[in-house]
């Protein structure tokens, strides 16, 4: 539990700095923009690595990762549905489109959908810490953006071509994760889940 907790604390401590415009600006003025970005990236990677390693170890040690509740089978269906907009919004974060403009902050929206979906189907303490932390961060960061200046996303291109591209790539990525990626990268094949009511 310790590596996961330390990783979460480090990762979110680093990512909470930009939510305070004055704190970020003070660090940039003192150390410079490039050193700030380098330190931010390095600490983020260290935190992320600790999160991945810590959560993986918890799955191998059930005695140290108590199950707080047993999710009913219907939550799996809801999770599958929530992950569809999560993946599409993730793609929209990188492609200018009317979807990105409407979502305003599609990456944060994607994190919220992703975290909520995984909270619904995982009842262990490690999952609560991991996905609950990401959900809380995404909600807080979205609220904080209303209080700080931020660059608006580029205007959407004319026509709906990029919207079609975002949805098409999102569906393709969703299918890839569903039938291969989740099992290969996370070690839990989604298609092995029972769909029985």
Image (tube, rainbow, N blue to C red):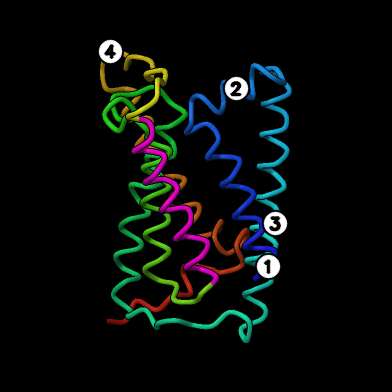
Instruction: Residue under label 2, please give it.
Output: 26
Dot 2: within a 10 Å radius of its alpha carbon, few (fewer than 14), some, or many (20 or more) residues? few
Mark with earlier residue (1, 3): 1
Secondary structure state at the residue bearing disc 2: helix
Secondary structure state at the residue bearing disc 3: helix
Above or below — where is 21 with respect to 186?
above
Q: Which-is-in-front pick, marks 1 and 3?
A: 1
Question: Magenta part of the protein: which range?
Answer: 126-145
> Residue 6 appears in which quarter of the rendering?
bottom right
Q: Which-is-in-front pick, marks 2 and 1?
A: 2
Seen in the image, is 182 located left or right of residue 175?
right
Query: In the rendering, at what x and y percent does residue 88 appear?
Result: 37, 41
Seen in the image, is 43 located left or right of residue 25?
right
> Residue 72 appears in which quarter of the rendering?
bottom left
Secondary structure state at the residue bearing disc 1: helix
Q: What residue is drawn where x is 46% and y is 69%?
A: 191
Mark with earlier residue (4, 1): 1
Q: What residue is drawn where x is 60% and y is 53%?
A: 9
Proximity of marks 4 and 1: CB atoms separated by less than 8 Å: no
The answer to whether any part of residue 148 appears in the image is yes
Proximity of marks 4 and 3: CB atoms separated by less than 8 Å: no
User: Mainly helix, strand or loop, the magenta region?
Assistant: helix
Above or below — where is 64 with respect to 87?
below
Instruction: Residue under label 4, please give it.
Output: 158
Mark with earlier residue (2, 1): 1
Q: What separation in Å lies between label 1 and label 3 (alpha carbons)?
A: 9 Å
Q: What separation in Å lies between label 4 and label 3 (alpha carbons)?
A: 43 Å
Q: What separation in Å lies between label 4 and label 2 (alpha carbons)?
A: 39 Å
Q: Which-is-in-front pick, marks 4 and 2?
A: 2
Q: Nearer the viewer, residue 102 or 129?
A: 129
The answer to whether any part of residue 171 appears in the image is no
Residue 134 lies in the magenta stretch: yes
């Amino acid at each position: 539990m310790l590596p996961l907790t330390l990783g979460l604390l480090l990762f979110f401590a680093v990512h909470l700095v930009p939510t305070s415009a004055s704190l970020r600006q003070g660090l940039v003025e003192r150390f410079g923009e490039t050193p700030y970005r380098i330190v931010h990236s390095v600490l983020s990677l260290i935190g992320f690595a600790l999160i991945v390693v810590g959560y993986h170890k918890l799955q191998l040690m059930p005695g140290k990762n108590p199950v707080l509740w047993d999710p009913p089978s219907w939550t799996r269906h809801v999770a599958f549905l929530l992950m569809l907009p999560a993946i599409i919004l993730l793609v929209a974060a990188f492609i200018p489109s009317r979807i990105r403009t409407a979502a305003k902050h599609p990456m944060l929206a994607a994190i919220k959908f992703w975290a909520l979906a995984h909270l619904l189907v995982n009842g262990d303490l490690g999952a609560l810490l991991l996905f609950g932390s990401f959900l809380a961060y995404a909600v807080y960061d979205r609220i904080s953006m209303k209080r700080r200046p931020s660059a608006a996303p580029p205007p959407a291109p004319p026509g709906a071509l990029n919207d079609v591209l975002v949805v098409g790539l999102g569906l393709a990525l969703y299918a890839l994760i569903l039938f291969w990626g989740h099992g290969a990268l996370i070690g839990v094949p989604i298609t092995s889940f029972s769909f029985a009511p």
